[in-house]
Amino acid sequence: MASAARDKRIDMRVDEETKLLAERATAAAGYLSVTEYLTSLIRANAPKILEQQANIEVTNQQFDQFMTICMDKSKVPSPRILEAAQRLDREGL
């Protein structure tokens, strides 16, 4: 693990069984501390979870339907949609 400054804390309480499980897994995986083990888990999993949250997956049929609606000049976006789009633009998304 990179040697970044460790000046922030995450406090958590767990039951005895979870604590023992974490300690056993720490030792079995060769980590020096539970903190190092948990940090590695967070660094491995968090980017995947955040990527899943940021991406939208649709089927080809769903995409085609979406594009058909977008190209339909008779459809006008609702004020709420326009407001949401403006907010996203302001936030740089």
Image (cartoon, rainbow, N blue to C red):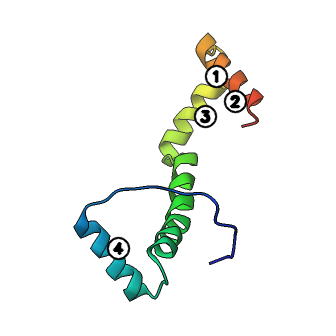
Q: Earlier in the sequence, mark 4 or mark 3?
A: 4
Q: Is residue 48 left or right of residue 71?
A: left
Q: Residue at x 47, y 78 (%)?
A: 33
Image location (x, y in percent) of residue 41: 48, 69
- The residue that mark 3 highlights is 67
Q: Is residue 29 above or below residue 61?
A: below
> According to the image, label 1 marks what residue?
84
* Residue 58 makes an appearance in the image: yes
Q: Are the two marked residues, 1 and 2, in contact with CB atoms closer than 8 angstroms?
A: yes
Using the numbered discs, state the Cα–Cα distance from disc 3 to disc 1 in whole angstroms: 19 Å
Residue at 45 percent of width and 55 percent of height: 11
Instruction: Please state, as top left, top right, bottom left or bottom right, where the N terminus lies in the image.
Output: bottom right
Q: Position of residue 50 (x, y in %)?
A: 55, 52
Q: Secondary structure at mark 1?
A: helix
Who comes first in sequence, dot 2 or dot 3? 3
Separation of marks 1 and 2 at Cα, in angstroms: 6 Å
Q: Residue at x 58, y 47 (%)?
A: 54
- What is the secondary structure assignment of the residue under circle 2? helix
| Marks 4 and 2, how far apart at CA | 41 Å
**CA separation, marks 1 and 4?**
43 Å
Q: Quadrant of the C terminus?
A: top right
Residue at the extreme top? 79
How crowded pointer 4 is (Cα within 10 Å; few <14, some 14-19, many 20+) is rated as: some
Q: Quadrant of residue 74?
A: top right
User: Which residue carries the number 4 mark?
Assistant: 22
Per the rendering, the mark at residue 88 is 2
